[in-house]
Image: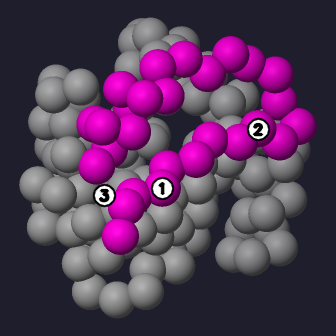
Amino acid sequence: MSATILFFKEDVRFVFRGADDLRKWIQKAAKAEGHRVAEINYIFCSDRYLRKMNKQYLQHDYNTDIITFDNSPGPNLISGDIFISIDRVRANARDYETTFQDELHRVMIHGILHLCGYKDKSAKDKARMREREDWWLHRR
């Protein structure tokens, strides 16, 4: 089975660059984390679009940078829809004094790490997630 990683836009304008290199990076990360990619759909969207989804599916009435829906068919084979707010990524890049591209890639790999089983609810889990994000960002 070959990996499918697709990129879509909903209710947002921005230019997405480097798709082929990012596909390779994502597959490499998943493999190193003990998983294979079946199908990943990245949907880049606006705050308004993602907040509506956050309310509808998670009953959270606030903005977020990412929502990951896990559709994995079985152990060690990941599949999912990863919605990313470009508005939040831009704001977070400013707030954290990093580039838009670095913040976008951080959020993209964050979704993959969730599909690989990483959590981020507790302080310990958040620290581990951040450690893995940083590790993968340095290996693009």
As helix, strand or loop, the secondary structure at mark 3 comes to helix
Q: Examine the image and state in which quarter residue 44 appears.
A: top right
Label 2 close to label 3 by CB (< 8 Å): no
* Nearest to N terminus: mark 1 or mark 3: 1
Callout 1 secondary element: strand
Sequence order check: which comes first, mark 1 or mark 2?
1
> Which image quarter holds the N terminus?
bottom left
> Label 3, on which residue?
113
User: In x, y percent, where is residue 90?
Assistant: 62, 20
Residue 4 is tagged as 1
Residue to which mark 2 is pinned: 9
Label 1 and label 3: CA atoms lie apart by 17 Å
Q: Residue at x 26, y 86 (%)?
A: 75
Determine whether, in the image, residue 95 is placed left or right of residue 97. Answer: right
User: Quick one: SS at disc 2?
Assistant: strand
Foreground label between 2 and 3 = 2
Identify residue type, mark 2.
Answer: Lys
The quarter of the picture where residue 99 lies is top left
Image height of 24 relative to 68, above or below: above
Residue 66: within the magenta? no
Q: Look at the image and tell me in which quarter the C terminus lies.
A: top left
Q: Is residue 9 magenta?
A: yes
| Residue 22 visible somewhere in the drawing | yes
Q: What range of the chain is rendered magenta?
A: 1-27
Callout in the foreground (1, 3):
1
Q: Is residue 69 above or below residue 135?
A: below
Q: Amino acid at mark 3?
A: Leu
**124 left or right, relative to 13:** left
Q: Residue furthest front?
A: 1
Location of residue 11 by image quarter: top right
